[in-house]
Image: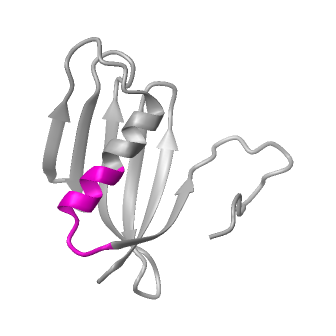
Amino acid sequence: MADLILVLNAGSSSLKFRGYDAGGSAPQLLLRGQVESLYTEPHFIISNAAGDRHEEHRWAPGTQLGHDGAIAWIGDFLRSHGEGQRLVAAGHRVVHGGVRFTGPTLVTPA
């Protein structure tokens, strides 16, 4: 069973993510994806590390999935379509940490 690290990047109307295999000496990219148009017409796309589209899903126009709904959808998708990976860590990319957060920071304990 591979250990998976999930990295999220929430924008104002999208949620991007990447999954890395944490089993080696350096994390290796396994998958990447996003849920776009979270509040109007959500669209989920997931690709392998090479960028080959694996699957996608569209919600009905007017659906307001939101960030919470997108995170839940991604988690459900990974649980039902994963290849035995076990989520061992999750993080969020922060672009503007100000003067207080200038490097990787543990927000909550594992």
Q: Is residue 45 magenta?
A: no
Q: Please, which residue is most extreme toward the top here?
A: 62
Quarter of the picture holding the N terminus: bottom left
- Position of 13 relative to 40 (above/below): below
Give the residue displayed 23% in from the left and 41% down from the top: 45
- Position of 1 relative to 5 (above/below): below
- Position of 4 relative to 51 (above/below): below
Q: Please, which residue is most extreme toward the bottom here?
A: 25
Give the residue displayed 20% in from the left and 71% down from the top: 83
Residue 80 found in image quarter: bottom left
Return the x and y of residue 39 as percentages of the image width and height.
39, 19
Give the residue displayed 62% in from the left and 70% down from the top: 110
Q: Is residue 69 left or right of residue 30?
A: right
User: Which contiguous range is marked in magenta?
Assistant: 75-85
- Position of 6 relative to 85 (above/below): above
Q: Is residue 11 left or right of residue 73?
A: right
Report the colour scheme: one colour
Return the x and y of residue 13 as percentages of the image width and height.
44, 25
Q: Is residue 33 left or right of residue 23?
A: left
Q: Is residue 25 left or right of residue 74?
A: right
Q: Is residue 82 magenta?
A: yes
Return the x and y of residue 108 as percentages of the image width and height.
69, 61
What is the chief secondary structure element of the magenta stretch? helix
Front one among 49 and 16: 16
Give the residue displayed 29% in from the left and 51% down from the top: 76
Residue 41 found in image quarter: top left
